[in-house]
Image: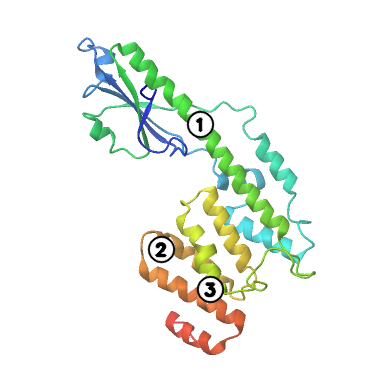
């Protein structure tokens, strides 16, 4: 039996949030009618963009009054300089705010009719493309392209909320486990407490998480959080920010940016080892004043 709907592009298990829903129309419609203007190239198509809703950054800003970048850094710093989360935030309160989001909200279902002369042209659009089948009656074709975006958006919103919860839980776990500087560092390993090859750990374990996670997603924020938590003891905080700022260029394949990141990693490791001879060579390569 053929699939009820067919994803021509995209992954139904991980929705993109941008939808082109397509039906093939095989019937006739009167010339000059409203329905006639909706069908083009034997296709009736609608598009919706459901990405511009509540992101993890929006949650931090609206619910906690924090920016994503500074908020995480400041709370980690507070947690590390106290006995934990006292004076930073209450994780249970954060979870409750997230849980209560949307309890009384009905989300809009925006979708607009679009015209394409062929299926190939329709597939040039960004995001998921879904074929809803062939119809020979315009009212049922129209019903299909109006109904499917509602189902798609409900699945996408649930996926988005689940990913946000996972990202915030990761964030809270890092904060809760942040070692106090008043006690022995028995929590998550940091640049100061890591036993092993610091460069290898950064380049193979921590930094790739920022490369491969799509920008502005819970996964990307969680990867940045893990990196910042590890690098918290770095005596040159500007280098940590510089490494993160290089990530978008490296995602685009900028090899010069990758080389500079590797130098900054080597510099952090040399500082931690107090290997001043190596540090001098690295700073020269970076073009820093010595």
The reply to whether callout 2 and callout 3 are in contact (CB within 8 Å) is: no
Q: Secondary structure at mark 1?
A: helix
**Does any portion of residue 61 appear in the rendered image?**
no
Q: Assess disc 2: are there few (<14), some (14-19) or many (≥20) residues with their C-alpha within 10 Å of its C-alpha.
A: some
Judging by the rendered image, the residue that carries numbered circle 2 is 250
Q: Earlier in the sequence, mark 2 or mark 1?
A: 1
Q: Name the image quarter holding residue 95.
A: top right
Towards the viewer: 143 or 37 = 143
- In the rendered image, the residue lying farthest to the bottom is 277
> Disc 1 vs disc 3: which is toward the camera?
3
From the top left corner, tell me how far across and down residue 49 is, in percent.
42, 35
Q: Most extreme residue toward the front, as rendered?
A: 1
Query: Is 60 drawn above or below residue 248 in the view shown?
Result: above
Q: Earlier in the sequence, mark 2 or mark 3?
A: 3
Q: Nearer the viewer, mark 2 or mark 3?
A: 3
Up/down of 249 relative to 215, above or below: below
Q: Could you give the CA–CA distance between mark 2 and mark 1, rounded to whole angstroms?
A: 32 Å
In the picture, the disc for residue 199 is 3
Expressed as whole percent of the image width and height from the top left, the position of residue 34 reads 28, 14
Near mark 1 (Cα within 10 A), the count class, few <14, some 14-19 or many ≥20, is some
Q: How many marks?
A: 3
Report helix, strand or loop for mark 2. Answer: helix
Q: Which disc number belongs to residue 155?
A: 1
Residue at the spot x=21%, y=12% of the render? 32
Q: Residue at x 72, y 58 (%)?
A: 177
Secondary-structure class at tag 3: helix
């Amino acid at each position: 039996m053929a699939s009820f709907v067919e994803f021509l592009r995209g992954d139904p298990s991980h929705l993109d949030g941008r939808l082109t829903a397509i039906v093939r129309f095989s019937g006739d419609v009167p010339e000059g009618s409203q329905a006639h203007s909706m069908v083009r190239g034997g296709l009736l198509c609608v598009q919706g963009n459901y990405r511009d809703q509540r992101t993890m950054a929006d949650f931090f800003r609206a619910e906690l009054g924090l920016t994503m970048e500074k908020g995480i850094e400041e709370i980690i710093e507070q947690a590390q300089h106290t006995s934990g989360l006292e004076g930073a935030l209450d994780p249970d309160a954060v979870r409750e705010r997230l849980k209560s989001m949307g309890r009384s909200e009905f989300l809009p279902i925006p979708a607009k009719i679009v015209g394409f002369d062929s299926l190939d042209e329709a597939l040039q659009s960004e995001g998921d493309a879904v074929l809803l089948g062939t119809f020979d009656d315009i009212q049922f074709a129209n019903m299909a392209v109006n109904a499917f975006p509602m189902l798609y958006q409900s699945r996408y919103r649930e996926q988005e909320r689940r990913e946000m919860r996972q990202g915030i839980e990761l964030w809270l776990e890092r904060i809760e486990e942040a070692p106090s500087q008043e006690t022995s560092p028995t929590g998550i390993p940091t640049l100061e407490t890591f036993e092993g090859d610091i460069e290898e750990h950064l380049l193979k374990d921590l930094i790739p998480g920022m490369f491969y996670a799509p920008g502005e997603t819970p996964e990307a924020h969680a990867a940045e959080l893990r990196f910042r938590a590890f690098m918290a003891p770095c005596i040159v905080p500007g280098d940590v920010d510089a490494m993160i700022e290089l990530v978008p260029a490296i995602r685009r394949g900028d090899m010069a940016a990758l080389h500079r990141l590797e130098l900054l990693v080597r510099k952090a490791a040399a500082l931690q080892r107090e290997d001043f001879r190596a540090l001098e060579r690295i700073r020269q390569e970076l073009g820093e004043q010595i």
